[in-house]
Amino acid sequence: MRPLTSEVNRTIDRRAWLAGVGAFAIAGLPGDCGSSLGRCAQGASLLPSGTSPNVHLLDWDLGTYAWGKAHAEIVVPAWGNEGERFPVLVALHGRGEALKGPIEGAMGWPRDYALLRAIDRVRAPPLDAADYEGFVVPERLRETNAALEARSFGGMVVACPWLPDVRPPASGDISAYGRFVTDVLLPRVRRETPAYGSREATGIDGVSLGGVVAMRIGLSSPDLFGAVGGLQPALSGGDNAVWVARARAARAKHADLKLRLLTSDRDYFRDEVLSLSRAWRDAGIAHDIADVVGPHDYSFNRGPGALELLLWHDGALARR
């Protein structure tokens, strides 16, 4: 798919966001939502949040840790033959959900980002522009539908844990939360859902804050993850050398590790994402890069975000 080259019109100062200012503007909340969490939450409550005929939604409390209470929503395919198993994807939400707390925050992907609706749609193609909330060019829509016609969506177990409001520069310490994902969440998913247990069938991804944390955890644990992605990841400028070193070390352990970065023409972090992609390319680190259309907000997450998350990992993760 041919990348787009639209200029980004930044509307907030990303340095202010990293310092804790403008949290709701960049955390995946709608651009017209204002700065009031109450107004944003009210808008989010209008999103499709009912059950889907294609999934079972499990609600898990997973204990209390130094970083907060662990809570997760687990999306399990409701189709398949007796004994059929599925790949596993850990999907991390943005900063807006981090600020909502464990129970509401864990509903980021299933409810607020309309992941259940996205699963329904990729199970019944063709997709149309409305499925992308209007954020798609005709060429990408045609290519996606052609791919779905050639190979139907197989599905995966999607683990959606609450992510606390961490500050994850490339060298920051997020080891405690990473251990929760790798040592607590993933083992329970494999015990209690029809999930494959191999690294080749396990991925991690996320959007914005969740994107950069997913990349940190995934690249630090290549023995556990076969695919690592970041959707509009909240990267900081000047960290490319650290990300190159992390990706190179992960690939040294597992040359088949799949990597993907995604940004959009109105993503606040577009320059940083494309810069990292160039740095990885120059270092010989093969990866997928997608530069699509859309803003950095809820409407993007509900459209391209959820669909791109599902479709890339459906192709990247092994079914064994």
Image (tube, helix red, strand yellow):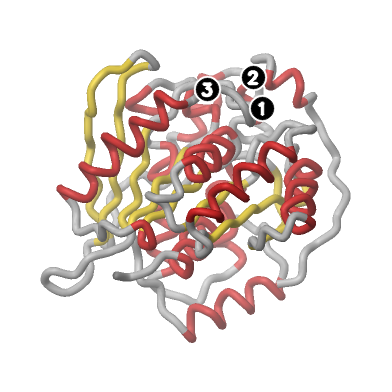
Residue 116: x, y in percent? 38, 53
Residue placed most toward the observer, 223 or 189:
223
Q: Residue furthest left?
A: 82
Q: Which mark is residue 290?
A: none
Q: Residues within 10 Å of mark 1 (few under 14, many from 20)?
A: many
Residue 234: x, y in percent? 65, 35
CA distance separating discs 2 and 3? 29 Å
The residue pinned by badge 1 equals: 25
Residue placed most toward the observer, 207 or 30:
207
Q: Residues within 10 Å of mark 3 (few under 14, many from 20)?
A: few
Can you tell which quarter of the image residue 176 is in?
top left
Q: Earlier in the sequence, mark 2 or mark 1?
A: 1
The residue pinned by badge 3 equals: 173
The residue shown at (35%, 65%) is 155
Q: Could you tell me which quadrant the N terminus lies in?
A: bottom right
| Relative horizontal placement of residue 221, taking residue 65 as reference (left or right) | right
The residue shown at (28%, 51%) is 51
Q: Amino acid at mark 1?
A: Ala
Q: Earlier in the sequence, mark 2 or mark 3?
A: 2
Element class at badge 2: loop
Between disc 3 and disc 1, the foreground one is 3
Q: Which mark is residue 35?
A: 2
Q: Amino acid at mark 2?
A: Ser
Q: Is residue 255 above or below residue 246?
A: below
Residue placed most toward the observer, 235 or 307:
235
The residue shown at (31%, 47%) is 50
